[in-house]
Image: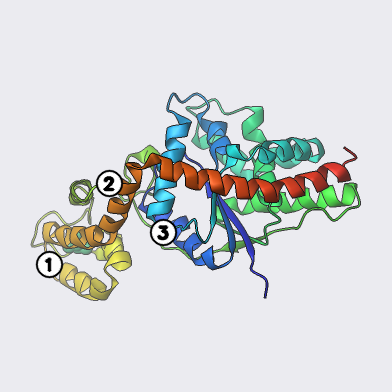
Amino acid sequence: MAALRVLSGTRPTSQLHLGNLLGALDNWKKYQKEDAFFMIADWHALTTEYESHLSLADQVFEVALDYLASGLDPKKATIFVQSWVPQHAELALLLSMITPLSWLERNPTYKDQIRELADKDIKTHGFLGYPVLQAADILLYQADVVPVGEDQLPHLELCREIARRFNHLYQKNVFKEPKAVLSKVPKLPGLDGRKMSKSYGNAIYLSDSPKEVEQKVMQMVTDPARKRRSDKGHPEVCPVYTYHQIFNAKNETTVAKECRAAERGCVECKREMCQTLQVFMTPMYETRSKLKKNKQEVVDILKAGSKKAAAVAQETLERAKQAAGM
Ligand code: SF4
């Protein structure tokens, strides 16, 4: 059976954290036995971060380190940078000609983000057109499946509609309609119990040293009703317990039982969690630190991946331009 063509990516708006690892990277690794393309979507980063004075090139490098340290293997999957493959921008322009404005304006994610990112001026052409660029990213590779989070489902549906409209308009079967694959991933809270996010300042990054991991875990919030060591705890409302469930599953029942009976204190509970997390994260940290010292090796991986991606993308782009009479 032919391998499935898989496409996914992430925006290099910050270094990746444990939430990204569980929510995306761990899932992507399962697709490495297929024909997988993993992108660092720097054009997409600009849609909301165009005013940022951080170096996007540096951010791309950091995310590449996160990809490689987490186990994405350039010998198995194609790892590339979106802007190094100019076909993405060109196809996005072509698709923007045929995408009705009303489709973009009714996109629920657009409205949510305008509300959520009220401190940024993102009422721009680029941000409204974000799903068109995303459609180009996917359609260029004729992806069979796209592993996505639930919030990305409307974008993928839009991508399918754009592909259908293009094929119908020009009466040519240029684009394949991709399928979304939703994966069940555990929800990892941040240090303060809210969703883990760079903007909340509550994340544990893949680049954190064992010492930084310890400092962060020790400041995590716990059951707010447990004021004293002798108070019985409620693990179901404690973020530290969620970490035990994910990273220390074999002791999860004991942790819950001892917490409920006030037989363990929160400090020792966090210490145990911290040690487990350090065992899990230290190999990634060491690989990442080694790669960071050898920037050229990482750049070469990205160049080779982008070259391979461009060859596939160019074939699709030519067919699309031909269909549109160009
Ligand atoms: S003992 Fe552990 S699970 Fe219970 S409240 Fe404290 S940190 Fe949370």
Q: Report the colour scheme.
A: rainbow
Picture quarter with ligand 1: bottom left
For label 3, the crowd category at 10 Å Cα-Cα, with few meaning under 14, some 14 to 19 and many 20 or more, is some
The mark lying in front, picked from 2 and 1, is 2
* Residue denoted by label 1: 262
The residue nearer to you, when weighing 263 against 181, is 181
Q: Position of residue 237 (x, y in %)?
A: 29, 60
* Residue denoted by label 3: 71
Circles 2 and 1: CB atoms closer than 8 Å: no
- The amino acid on which the numbered mark 3 sits, given as a three-letter code, is Gly
* Residue denoted by label 2: 208
- Please say if 28 is above or below 139: below
Sequence-wise, the earlier of marks 2 and 1 is 2
For label 1, the crowd category at 10 Å Cα-Cα, with few meaning under 14, some 14 to 19 and many 20 or more, is some
The mark lying in front, picked from 1 and 3, is 3
Q: Position of residue 111 (x, y in %)?
A: 60, 38
| Drawn side of residue 283 relative to residue 132, left or right | left
Q: Position of residue 135 (x, y in %)?
A: 69, 47
Q: CA distance from mark 1 to mark 3?
A: 39 Å
Instruction: Please state, as top left, top right, bottom left or bottom right, where the N terminus lies in the image.
Output: bottom right
Q: CA distance from mark 2 to mark 1?
A: 32 Å
